[in-house]
Image (cartoon, rainbow, N blue to C red):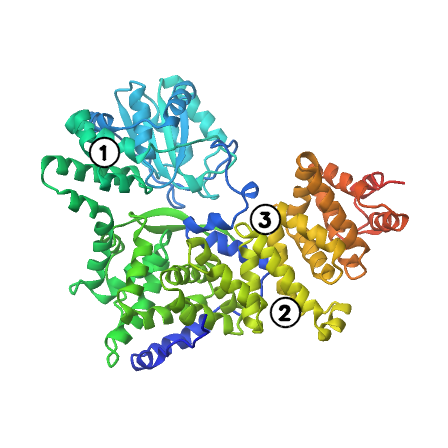
Amino acid sequence: MSQSEPEDTTDNEKSAGVGEEEKQEKTDAAPEQRPPAWAARRDLIEHSPHNLAGGLVHGPQYGLAGGEVHGNVNIQIGGHRETPAVSGEIPSEVLARMSVTFVESEVFAKALTRLRDERVLVLSGGDSTGRRAAALMLLHRLGISHIRDIDSTTSPAAVRDHLGSPAGYLLANISVSRTRPLRETHLFAIREQLNNSDGHLVVTVAESSTHRDLAHLAWEPPSSEDVLAAHVRSQEGSSGWERVRDLAAVRGFLEQDHTPQEAADFAKQLLAVLAGGVTEEELSSYGEESAQTQVESWLTDDTMHLRDKAFLISLGVFDQAPYALAAELADKLFRYLHATESPNTREGVPVFGSSRNSRLALARARGYQGTETTAWGPVDQYMAAFKESTLPTRLLDTAWMLYPSARPALISWLRALAADGRPLVRTRASAAAAALTKSDLSSGLAHLIEPWAQDRSYISRLAAANTFTLAHLLGAPAIPEILHDWCVGEDENYRWTAIRAYGLLGPVLPGKAMKALITAAREYCRKEDRKKELEEAEESEELLELVEAIQLLLLSARGPVLTELSRLADVDAQVRAPLLGAFLLACEQQEDDGESRPLVLEWYADAAAQSPAEAVQLTVLWRSALNDRRHTDQALKVMADWVRHVERTPTAESALAHLLAEIPEEPPERQRLRHLLRTMSSADGGPPPPVAERLLAALPH
């Protein structure tokens, strides 16, 4: 793969005053600080588009299992100011029409039983899965004649004020926040009121909004085929459905994932085919062409201002992110686009131009109250998202591939975003670059990834690694091959980028990533000029990156990486130092939930109960780290931190006691641990905490 220089995009920009903009962006850029790799990984997961973040997450650590979770959930309803309670009755004719075509999925019967027995049901589901329709039909199937829709901004404490009659109630599409939670106590009060009034309530919440502390039921939408069949049969009977079900266009439609609403829209086209108004050829191109035609019409519409087109593209990058952010950065993109379109003129940006609602309507997007993840916790924001989930990718791909004249502006814009001080902005820049790299690998590499990788700025090289990671998750070709070449190549910056990307790709490429990182570590340690550095434990930037990448790999992929790491640390003296360093770095890492829970200690507790082989491997690595003179001090420091954690969290004491009983095999090992427990300071700098005395008893004599 050529490592070509990107085209110069500065001449037109300077003529239009964009140079001043870039100077300001450099002033606003994030300072050159190098956060721990785990923190950078967290930013990538939290701020990536939702369809990509899951590929970076190790299943047992995150997410929900089985569709039901119990305890507290925090749900954001509106802003900080309490909104007066509002509700209204849903017309019976609306429910009657919906009932004719509604399809009950497998989970519907279970949901109906729970609603009948418990009177209140929290129904979770992804956007456009039909969870609101399901909630209405659950109430309708109970035979409830009056169903009231409660305003989603109603505070949890005020919900019970609506429940005074024997009716059905819907509280739909509420958002989640830690600042205004819906708790078990709210549900208890709601259920008590419903029992008194003989009512029933369904609360719907976004799938990503559910937390493991509140009982809920995950809604699973019916299949697209069932939705199509129901709509066609409602108008043309079973014979009509039999006439169209085997059409090539229908089979092609059903081979892809579609929302219930998309299936209902396609059913209208099938009815038009049966009526003779649409041909089979027109039907075949309906779905693909309708979305693509919409995007192209936006970009080529001469009546639409260039600033509005910039907003559409910006919203494509910042879909499901704060509206204000998409609008702010759209104005920067507008300046770059204008510099290409009219290089000899400048055009200002109307400070108080289009209203928020009009811009969202133009984009066929929706606005909603949500939360933005920040380093200080979730922050309430007004978010914006396209109603059609394919539009963000289509907008970027179409602008990049069909209108190459837009490329210089897009390149300059994405480079500016990648240097922004906000993690969300930087991450979305990498996500957009990944999408463009999938569409055009050579250009994505030449214009974005390679210049970022060659930049000595940590943030720029991180942008390159993140782009590689997200591009592979999107299905871009040849990413593993490029990473391998960079990882074993002579260019130090390319090696750094590949090493970080391999660490991030652990959950999806554990074998290849581990092999590549070990090869890189072995080559690094092999060089003669590294010997003194290794002996003195002076870590270069590349060695630190190797250690952190293996740490990421171990924590994200777990079992397969642990097996190989423990084996190599035992038999390969050449790479033992970085491997043990990575293990101890993983042991230092705490859960990112504010509770300071060591991830590896929790891993050991689970392994001791469920996977003895992993527990043994973790124990062996601990023993090796304590006995390795280059890592003894660090290992003792981490162990002391674990003891202090156990003092704060007594439930973890048994796991640490079990580990301490298993680590020492020789008298010096036991003496080292005894000395630590007898002399370590408490969290406030005082004498050893009481738990240290109890843990002493766990050590073998």
Residue 163 as seen in the image, left or right of residue 696: left
> Tag 1, which secondary structure?
loop
Q: Amino acid at mark 3?
A: Ala
Q: Nearer the viewer, mark 2 or mark 1?
A: 1
In this figure, which residue is indicated by the disc labeled 3?
557
- Spatial separation of the CA atoms under disc 2 and disc 1: 61 Å
In this rendering, would 666 be left or right of 29? right
Residue labelled with disc 2? 541
The span from disc 3 to disc 1 (Cα, nearest Å) is 43 Å
Q: Residues within 10 Å of mark 3 (few under 14, many from 20)?
A: many
Amino acid found under the numbered disc labelled 1: Arg
Residue drawn at the location 60% of the way across and 60% of the way down: 516
Name of the residue lying farthest toward the left: 276
Residue 594 appears at what percent x and percent y?
A: 59, 47
State the image coordinates of residue 253 (x, y, percent, origin top left): 27, 41
Badge 1 is on which residue? 245
Q: Earlier in the sequence, mark 3 or mark 1?
A: 1
> Which residue is at a point 33% across and 57% down the rendered structure image?
316
Q: Callout 1 environment at 10 Å: few (<14), some (14 to 19), or many (20+)?
A: some
Residue 598 visible: no
Q: Is residue 156 above or below residue 441?
A: above
Q: Secondary structure at mark 2?
A: helix
Q: Secondary structure at mark 3?
A: helix
Q: Nearer the viewer, residue 133 or 176?
A: 133
